[in-house]
Image (cartoon, helix red, strand yellow):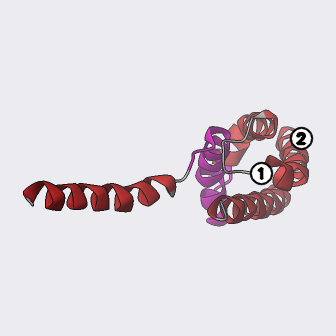
Amino acid sequence: MKRIVLFAITAFALFVARPAAAQEKAKWAEKDAFHEIMSKTFHPAEEGKLEPIKARSAEMLQKAIAWKQSTAPEGFDKKKVKKDLGTLVKGAKKLDKMVQAKATDEDIKKQLTVLHDVFHAITEKCTDEHENH
């Protein structure tokens, strides 16, 4: 009888634990790398501090290119965000050129905001797609 109860408890624990493990989100390293630089440049810009984006615009462009060229992890549909990733790269190129050309702070902040919005549109599609799997 003890074996049956022990077996039932073990089986139940495995049954409960397995769906939780299956729901664990896969990481898209290139998405996370882009997010890190976006976070460290956009939030200061909201406060009028543009030094971080001015210093890291080329790096942001490289992270956008790397994300676009990366292989999506299981659970993400890269086709769903392919166009938006292209828009992200174009926007990052534009931003970097603006920084290099010493555009006004206002114009740099506007372009960074556009890029931030594109980034969030992509992540929302990634989240929606991933959670549906």
Identify the magenta region: 26-51
3D distance between C-alphas at marks 1 and 2:
31 Å
At horizontal 83% and vertical 54% (from top left) the residue drawn is 81
Instruction: Give left or right: position of 8 versus 64.
Output: left
Residue that mark 1 sits on: 77
Q: Secondary structure at mark 2?
A: helix
Picture coordinates of residue 29, whole percent (x, y): 61, 39
Picture coordinates of residue 60, whole percent (x, y): 73, 41
At horizontal 61% and vertical 45% (from top left) the residue drawn is 32
Q: Earlier in the sequence, mark 1 or mark 2?
A: 1
Instruction: Give left or right: position of 62 versus 37.
Output: right
Residue flagged by tag 2: what amino acid is it? Lys
Question: In which quadrant will I find the C terminus?
Answer: bottom right
Residue that mark 2 sits on: 97
Picture coordinates of residue 26, whole percent (x, y): 57, 47
At horizontal 67% and vertical 45% (from top left) the residue drawn is 31
Please rate how many residues cluster around mark 2, counting C-alpha atoms within 10 Å: few if below 14, some from 14 to 19, many from 20: some
Question: From the viewer's perspective, is the residue at label 1 or at label 2 nearer?
Answer: 1
At horizontal 87% and vertical 49% (from top left) the residue drawn is 82
Residue flagged by tag 1: what amino acid is it? Asp
Instruction: Give left or right: position of 21 versus 58.
Output: left
Question: In which quadrant will I find the N terminus?
Answer: bottom left
| The one of 13 and 53 positioned closer to us in this rendering | 13
| The one of 131 and 116 positioned closer to us in this rendering | 131
The image shows residue 120, relative to residue 81, as above or below, that is below
Q: Secondary structure at mark 1?
A: loop
Picture coordinates of residue 54, whole percent (x, y): 72, 43
Q: Quadrant of residue 43?
A: bottom right
